Image (tube, helix red, strand yellow):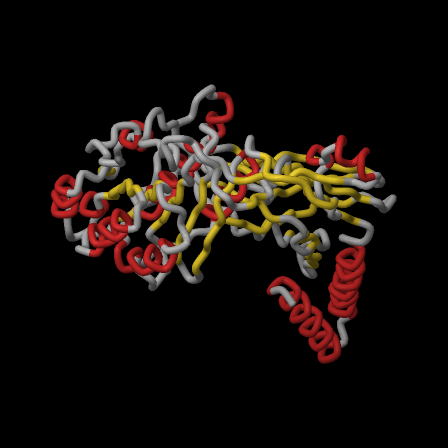
Amino acid sequence: MTRSARVVLILLGVSLLVGAITGNSLYFRLGYIWAGLLGVSWVMSRLALRGVNLRRRPRALRSQVGQIFEEHYELQNNSRWPRLWIEVHDASTLPGAHGSHVITLIGGRESRTYLARTRLVQRGVFPLGPTTLVSGDVFGLFPVNRTFPTTDSVLVYPILVDVRGFPNPPGLLPGGEALRRRTPQITSNAAGVREYAPGDPLNRIHWVSTARRDRLIVKEFELDPLADVWIFVDAARSVQAAKPYKPPEFDPRDFWRKRYKFEMPPITIEYSVTAAASLARYYLQRGRSVGLAYADQTVRILPSDRGGRQLGKILEALALVRAEGEMPLQGLVEAQARHLPRGSTVVLITPSTADSVYRTVDLLVRRGLRPVVVLIDAVTFGGYFSTQRVVESLKMMNVPYCQVQEGQDLGVVLSTTVGKPNWT
């Protein structure tokens, strides 16, 4: 019960009590007024949201940090009685969400719509809801609400920057031999044929063999001699650093700007994730097979693959990375290095300044792999130790690297790796 309703009840009680004591009919009439007010208000509140429905339709359920997320709200009054006011309250955890709205004077059998636009400032998965409708009587004595559960979620990908050049893995062998290993991918190296299995794409059917044997026969392929690319992201909590950061406030004028530059938050894990996503796109656009590995609360290994579908998988995985891991990068690499084909390029992205960085690089070199290191300079993010010692060690080992500092253009830095790789 609201405070206003309690006041009316007190006035009703006082009026009846004084009327009984004094016998004055005026007080009884006042009591009837207060009682009638309570009764009418209660009935109005019970009918306020009857026959009212809400639909919210996002334009897209996948977007990217820095872009505009647009959502369409439709409030339907299926009753023939008008509604004075209805408040739409959006309880979504999406930062900066602007879905809450107040709609007044809704006619019978009428629908009202509005658009909610939000500048996406944080990657991750955010539920679109729950959504609550709040209404009541004219005097606000008996407010009522109705909650619509969450039905959709929006997946926000990390920022992507343009990388113009980065060390590319050459072929595994000078002669370009194929790896004798079957693959579900379609490559230029046909290895043989086999019986058709449910789920095989039609473009793999070998029609000559099918006509000869009078049953469906499909082609098998082997991996081509291009080296795989593996990207390792250091998500250990102990090596991260961050400066105080306040997300930018939403400005409606941004909708009409042709270009909007989103400033990356001064957090090492955000720079690491953006670097990983951008390099994955760079390699995939050049026909490479790219895999991803990181360890936050769980170890996530995304097998290497090619194509736009693989980029979507990588972006989805990176959108969920949290700097909450306990496993150091060295442990993650040691666990996976034995499974990587010789000649693969391994991109290490880390803000760590410990000796384990170049020990990890040395392990990769001894296993016949080709490391490239992206160092996130934690001291520029409010950390305590510089990466200079690691840089000197990488120079001595002839390992290509790039050093990223807070506030730098990440695309430019990634395009200017230092050191000539000794990949012979």
**Residue drawn 47% across the image and 46% down it:** 319
332 to 262, vertically: above or below: below
**Residue drawn 21% across the image and 44% down it:** 377
Q: In which quarter of the image is residue 141?
A: bottom right
Q: Position of residue 167 (x, y in %)?
A: 31, 32
Q: Position of residue 41 (x, y in %)?
A: 75, 58
Q: Which residue lies furthest to the bottom in this view?
A: 21
Q: In which quarter of the image is residue 142?
A: bottom right
**Residue drawn 19% across the image and 51% down it:** 353
Query: Left or right of 400: which side holds 385?
Result: left
Query: Left or right of 381: which side holds 195?
Result: right
Asked whether 354 or 245 is in front, the reply is 354
Asked whether 299 or 128 is in front, the reply is 299
Asked whether 316 or 218 is in front, the reply is 218
Q: Where is residue 20 in the image (x, y as percent from the top left)?
A: 75, 78
Q: In which quarter of the image is the C terminus?
A: top left
Query: Left or right of 18: which side holds 263?
Result: left
Q: Specify whether residue 197 is in view.
A: yes
**Residue drawn 20% across the image and 43% down it:** 380
